[in-house]
Amino acid sequence: MLTVAKGTNLALMFFLELGVLISVGYWGFTLAAPLVVRILAGLGGPALFATLWGLFAAANGARFPLRGLARAAFEIAWFGGGAAALVASGLVTSGVVFAALYIVNGILRLVWHQV
């Protein structure tokens, strides 16, 4: 049973990672700005976030893997950015739920040594 819960928690982490990229893209495309700016933000925001994740936090392929407090700070900023993007897009409840899911996921990853 615990193995299933741990696997589910890792799957949630993956879906939260995708959620950040989707949230940032949604935020970019819903800006009150000219079309060109919306397209640049809607495509460039997720590209920037994905690049940062790949450089510093990807599970087995990060170019400059972060550990300990640096990793925690990066994750809080990265996933917080996803939640903030939802709130900035007007999806306040979704942003709060997203942040709560990340907090629960992070605590479980710490308890189960999945970090």
Image: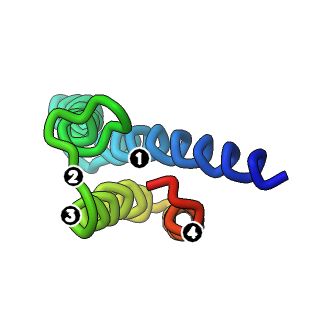
Drawn side of residue 17 relative to residue 75, left or right: right
Q: Residues within 10 Å of mark 4 (few under 14, many from 20)?
A: few
Between the residue at mark 4 and the residue at mark 3, the CA separation in whole angstroms equals 18 Å
Tag 3 and tag 2, C-beta contact below 8 Å: yes
Q: Which quarter of the image is occupied by the C terminus?
A: bottom left
Q: Is 40 in front, or is 108?
A: 108
Decide which of tag 3 and tag 1 comes sooner along the chain.
Answer: 1
Instruction: In the rendered structure, find residue 111 and report the number of the disc placed on it.
Output: 4
Q: Is residue 15 visible?
A: yes
Tag 4 and tag 3, C-beta contact below 8 Å: no
Residue plotted at (37% across, 38% down):
59
Q: Which residue is mark 2?
A: 66
Residue plotted at (33% across, 58% down):
75
Between the residue at mark 3 and the residue at mark 2, the CA separation in whole angstroms equals 6 Å
Between the residue at mark 3 and the residue at mark 1, the CA separation in whole angstroms equals 19 Å
Tag 4 and tag 1, C-beta contact below 8 Å: no
Q: Amino acid at mark 4?
A: Val
Q: Is residue 38 visible?
A: no
Tag 2 and tag 1, C-beta contact below 8 Å: no
How is the rendered protein coloured?
rainbow
User: In the rendering, at what x and y percent does residue 74 appear?
Assistant: 25, 59
Q: Quadrant of residue 85?
A: bottom left
Q: Is residue 85 above or below residue 39?
A: below
Between the residue at mark 4 and the residue at mark 1, the CA separation in whole angstroms equals 23 Å
Instruction: In the rendered structure, find residue 70 and report the number of the disc placed on it.
Output: 3
Q: Is residue 41 above or below residue 114?
A: above
User: In the rendering, at what x and y percent does residue 14 appear?
Assistant: 52, 40
Q: Residues within 10 Å of mark 3 (few under 14, many from 20)?
A: few
Instruction: In the rendered structure, find residue 20 and report the number of the disc placed on it.
Output: 1
Between label 2 and label 1, give the one nearer the viewer. 2
